[in-house]
Amino acid sequence: MDKIINYKILDCTLRDGGYYTNWDFNRDLVNTYLNSFNDLPVDYLEIGYRNNPMKEYLGEYFYCPEYVLREARQLSTKKLVIILDEKNVRPEHVEQLLKPCVGLIDMVRIALDPEQFSRALKLAEEIKKMGFEVGFNTMYMSKWKQNTAFLNELKYVDAVADYFYMVDSYGGVYPQDVIDTIQMVKERTSVKLGFHGHNNMELALINSLTAAEHGAEIIDATVTGMGRGAGNLKTELLLTALNARMGLKLNFNALSKTVDGFEKLKQNYHWGTNLPYMVSGANSLPQKDVMEWVSTRYYSINSIIRALENQKAGIIDNERLAEFRPNKKSKKGLIIGGGPTARYHQRAISEFIKAQNDLVIIHASSKNAALYKDINFDQYFSLVGNEGYRLEQVFEDIKNFKGNCVLPPYPRKMGTYIPAAIGGKSYELPSDLFTDKFGDSHTAIALQTALCLGVEELAVIGYDGYQEGSITQKEQSLIYENEYLFKKFVDSCSCSLYSLTPTNYKSLNVNSVYSIIYG
Amino acid sequence: MDKIINYKILDCTLRDGGYYTNWDFNRDLVNTYLNSFNDLPVDYLEIGYRNNPMKEYLGEYFYCPEYVLREARQLSTKKLVIILDEKNVRPEHVEQLLKPCVGLIDMVRIALDPEQFSRALKLAEEIKKMGFEVGFNTMYMSKWKQNTAFLNELKYVDAVADYFYMVDSYGGVYPQDVIDTIQMVKERTSVKLGFHGHNNMELALINSLTAAEHGAEIIDATVTGMGRGAGNLKTELLLTALNARMGLKLNFNALSKTVDGFEKLKQNYHWGTNLPYMVSGANSLPQKDVMEWVSTRYYSINSIIRALENQKAGIIDNERLAEFRPNKKSKKGLIIGGGPTARYHQRAISEFIKAQNDLVIIHASSKNAALYKDINFDQYFSLVGNEGYRLEQVFEDIKNFKGNCVLPPYPRKMGTYIPAAIGGKSYELPSDLFTDKFGDSHTAIALQTALCLGVEELAVIGYDGYQEGSITQKEQSLIYENEYLFKKFVDSCSCSLYSLTPTNYKSLNVNSVYSIIYG
């Protein structure tokens, strides 16, 4: 191999890409991958994890059984690498986990939280004894500066590791941060340095080149950037850059072949950066959380940012409200959901409402609230995430808002926007909810509100469930949550529950709104 | 607007994104876009081009008729911008093109090739007279250093422009290049500088931040990076970075809304970088050409790179071969294409071949060549792009290769790989081809080879054309090309042409291989 660069390149597509495929990859793709890399100027291939057995299903490259290692060893002319997750592996596991690797695997890496650095040193010692090269993939580099305990122990890494990696876990560091971190590390150890960059801010290439320029001796990358969340430095980008800038000889046909294979996979899994990943990168926030908050929960991206800003400023991100302990009780309740049937059957529902003597209306969503604005019964509103903005839109005259708002119990995960005009009409639920999960969802709050109000017979409308046609992942998780909540409610609460409108929820009984004859 | 940054931001999503949509955008999306930006810390919105009428269809934001400008002006609170393409606009057009913009548009930009800098200065003078701010979007910044004529004239820009933009047309400059270019420009003019980055190498963010840090006073970006080829700096990335780093106040809900709109569009148009765009960026090569070479032509990415390397080294990228002027003529020919019917009907085709007295076999593709290896008639092979590699695979014993290879006329666009063993058996076509277009395609070479061989009756097999199910864009263009070539051949050559196997090509007659009774 013509090498005009004085550092090594490690491709970890199968290992880091496995987060998307549960570590199973089509055999043809793996063969293409291994064969192509035989013709590419890359030094190491990390093919997966070795792990103790877990309860859930995890695939081929999460465990890398011996026959998998053997096949890879036969196909590949490169140095092969596996990685251990420090949080799950102790020194006493090393013998069993790594014995099958001897003679097949060249380097064993350890993925570690710097908080566990001393524990990782002991693990490394065991690995080193077996004759492997050892790499430390040390996470959260953007937070090292504050971690003096870890920095003080850094010097011990020299004895047990061949490479010490700075991992930009959040994908939010800038070239200058890379330079500063390298200097900070170099003052404490003389181990060879590595860099593993994430691409949330599209800085993986420039950060990696900067690391190499300032003395890093090994750089990680993955084909098409495949990897957890926003993904990694793209191998093809690094190699193309080095080809044009440094004259690194490059077989573009081989590169193109393996890129094509993973591009096809990308059409199913959609890795790569996007606005939520940028936000998590820019603010050193776990991308898993941001993605969940944005995509399957109810928080607006603004409220996430506000929560972040509060966190940074040391402000507790939600205020203590008066607890919801209503004196007035009602035997009968109606929860209004956001589904179209609450609009479609409005006339019948209005007749149903008129026929009642005693009823409380609970709006799980304010989506259909305008339709039922002028009803004389008491009205309550679930207030989570975005809902405050919706309320302002629905009730243009919000100063004269007559309802009450109910929020999840304190402390809430995320600041909830409460329009100023309804501040005095907002309450938080007590902490003892009927449900152990999804307690901050619209439906959980609505159901709990009914319980707090002493409701014994509870009707719902506008909970339509699965509809024909395709639904988004967001809709899917919402339906799953609601199904869970309805079942929990029916199983554990002494309150009857039924839907007046058509529904596909299996846990809901139905009493058609048209079947209720008011004499 | 809270501004803690000392430079302006210009969003040009509609103008630069129009390259993908032919400058037509759904009205709702445009409204979302304009409304969202009212809540975002961006100073200018470039909504499109103004252009003299063209022959082909180009949409709303390519011409920006007055009512479009007026609508945008009503919806937006931002400064509005249009751009002129210097190559199509002369000073005498300015009055007509820009009069409708007066009072609606704040800045007029000029997109220009630095070769036309003096012409652009005159254009700018006319624009300035009408009272607009003027921006110079000067392309190809990676090549300025060599362009002394342009550099010498730079000083004249002060008098006629408010902003002078460095455009990284190829998306291949690095932060240090940005710094060097700024210095080079600042030595020659005191006009305010701007930067317009492309994202081929995922360097648009770091280059833009670097430009701003070194004195650029305006930065371009587009939502989701929508823009020609690999696209631009992503507005959401720039704003998220500035929010986290500089405390720029940012309404993420507004940002998220407009990003969502364009993300949906991206699912149809797929802008963003990929390996060919990286190659063009890294090597300052027009991405339009690279994309065409890679996607719809027959050149391997390796041969493109080799051609590039030759170009750089001043080596002519293809050699002169002996011209194809065969003495031996044949009345009858058979072209074998790459389609599956050439395999499916192999038995019948072999019978057909056996029944002939005099025949030449011409392989347009070597895909099916192995099946017909042992035939005793003379065989010719179209040799373009990748085909040499395929030949080596098909004929393992290539040293005993008995065929002849035919290449496109000299000079060829791209170096063609000729396996050493068949160097003496390779010829180039004379320059007078039967076709004015696609002369370097497999099929054109095969047809021209037949003509050179004096063929009067030409059969083809394995030209299947459109099949059921979805086909790739690459297949589509190939089919379009073949259709064009067959039609041209039938219309202009005195040689009969028909297919022996099923075909969906409209320009091919069919004589079923089973209808020819040898008796």
Image (cartoon, coloured by chain):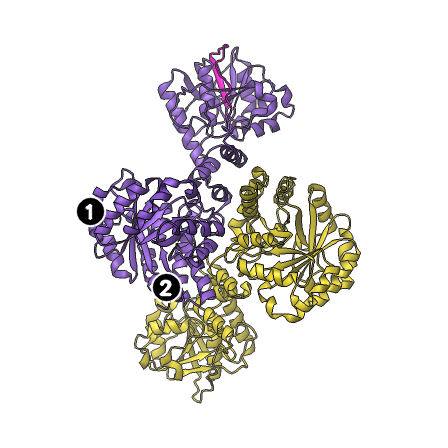
Chain colours: A yellow, B purple
The foreground one among B362 and A504 is B362
Q: Tag count in the figure?
A: 2
Asked if the stretch drawn in magenta spans residue A313, the answer is: no
Q: Please state which amino acid type lies under the numbered disc 2.
A: Leu
Residue A86: percent from left, percent from top: 69, 63
Q: Chain of mark 2?
A: B
Identify the mark at residue B40; answer none if there is no mark. 2
Q: What residue is drawn where x is 35% and y is 39%?
A: B115
Per the image, label 1 sits on a secondary structure element best described as: helix
Residue A165: percent from left, percent from top: 64, 58
Asked whether residue B506 is in view, the answer is: no
**Label 1 neighbour load within 10 Å: few <14, some 14-19, many 20+:** few
Q: What residue is drawn where x is 24% and y is 49%?
A: B127
Q: Which residue corresponds to mark 1? A: B95
Q: Which residues are magenta?
A: B319-337
Horizontal side of residue A407 vs B16, given as left or right:
right
Asked if residue A11 is positioned above or below residue A395 in the image, the reply reads: above
Per the image, label 2 sits on a secondary structure element best described as: loop
2 and 1 marks in contact (CB < 8 Å): no
Residue B39: percent from left, percent from top: 35, 65
The answer to which image quadrant residue B58 occupies is top left
Asked if the stretch drawn in magenta spans residue B322, the answer is: yes
Q: Please state which amino acid type lies under the numbered disc 1.
A: Glu
Label 2, label 1: how many angstroms apart (C-alpha)? 33 Å
Overall secondary structure of the magenta stretch? loop
